[in-house]
Amino acid sequence: MKLSFFLFFVLLSGSVFSTPAAPESQYERSLFCGSWENKEHVKFVIEELKLPVYRISLDKIFAILAMLTSKAKHMPEVQIFFHQYFFNDSFFSERIFHELFQSTYRSGSICAPRRDQFFELVTNWLDEIPDDSSSTWTVLLSKIESVSFGTQVSLDRSKKFEGIISRIKAMNDENFSNIIELYLKFCRTFNKEIFNSIGFERVYSLKEDSDFSKATAAIFLFGKKIPLEIFENLDFERINKLDDQNFSKILCQVFNSDQIVPSNILERLNLRRISTLTEESSVLDVSDAIFNSDQTISLSVFEDIVKAVNAIKDPYSFAQIICKLCNSWNAIPSSILENFNFNKINNLKNDFFL
């Protein structure tokens, strides 16, 4: 009885809720009408920008930041604000990047008009941008990618481009891999010149497994066709020896990819390891990716994920995976469905169905 009710509940789930938009701000005049040479006015504006409230449009925010940069960059208060709130994680920077990075289920894009505003502003602070501000560097690299190589640009802009590329190229592995991950997720063109200029070949030999798996997973997830040589240069022996957490991270992106991964590349991955995954979060993520994958999934892969799912001891985690299964995009072979241990659903307490 519980099993029948559970499946009925899953199939009818999926309600959509919306949040009303925040009201438009009414106090812009007080922000713009003061003197930018006046320290008290500058301090007032900065304190208003720090408030965790959407009281002013992003266009107005960029206008204020441009005024602070051109008129008051020498003030310690302005420098501290940019270092602590703009280039570091904060409510303020989160709002900026939320509008710059437009996410979709599997990938995303960067808003071009916002990117251009951002570039013109941030390149005035190029020497002050910390290496670990990966979102900032990704947007700047995206701007360079949008200008075709060989296109005539001003001497000033050319120097800025060179400065950005040289900074990224000199970063440590962690910061470099973070930029590669973001860039491949949000930049929709594989620009070979850009990758060569920043030393992309580093991804094949990143020292830490976490950095290596992060960059490798991003390559598989990239939404456009990647040259076959990029896949072929990956260290599959190392990939197959990664711990379950890093290995499953790569598997998820392989199955989530919008591009069809060549069959000869898939064959080099030890997919039989799927049946031995023991961490419940890894099994949940990998099973969800398989159920909704655009790749051609072999029967043996389905059989292996069933083994991993059935080995889960917690009935609630098992039920969560079955929820994903029932809402998957793909038709799952009936011979595979029959192998799931649905009796585990009967171990759920009644309050799970409320």
Image (cartoon, rainbow, N blue to C red):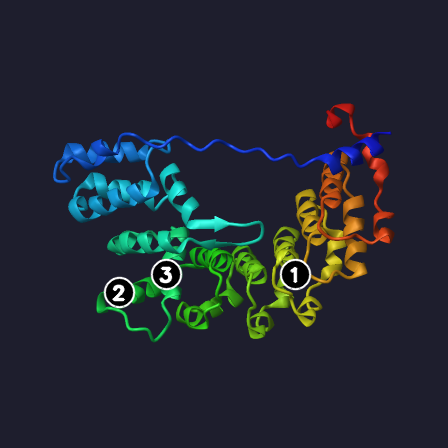
Q: Position of residue 327 (x, y in %)?
A: 72, 44
Which of label 2 and label 1 is nearer to you?
A: 2
Q: Amino acid at mark 1?
A: Lys
Q: Indicate whether 339 appears above or below 164.
A: above
Label 3 environment density (alpha carbons within 10 Å; few <14, some 14–19, many ≥20): some
Horizontal side of 129 relative to 282 (left or right) equals left
Residue at position x 25%, y 41% in the image: 80
Instruction: Choose the circle earlier in sequence order: 1 or 3.
Output: 3
The kind of secondary structure element at disc 1 is helix
Which of label 1 and label 3 is nearer to you?
A: 3
**Distance Cα–Cα, label 2 vs label 3:** 11 Å
Horizontal side of 184 relative to 40 (left or right) equals right
Residue at position x 60%, y 73% in the image: 232
Would you say the residues marked 2 and 1 are in contact, meaning their CB atoms lie under 8 Å apart?
Answer: no
Question: What is the count of numbered marks?
Answer: 3
Q: Position of residue 132 (x, y in %)?
A: 39, 51
Which residue is identified by label 3? 143
Q: Amino acid at mark 2?
A: Arg
Q: Position of residue 32 (x, y in %)?
A: 20, 37
Quadrant holding the C terminus? top right
Q: Amino acid at mark 3?
A: Lys
**Distance Cα–Cα, label 1 vs label 3:** 37 Å
The kind of secondary structure element at disc 2 is helix
Image disc number at residue 315: none
Which residue is identified by label 2? 157
Which residue is identified by label 1? 241
Label 1 environment density (alpha carbons within 10 Å; few <14, some 14–19, many ≥20): few
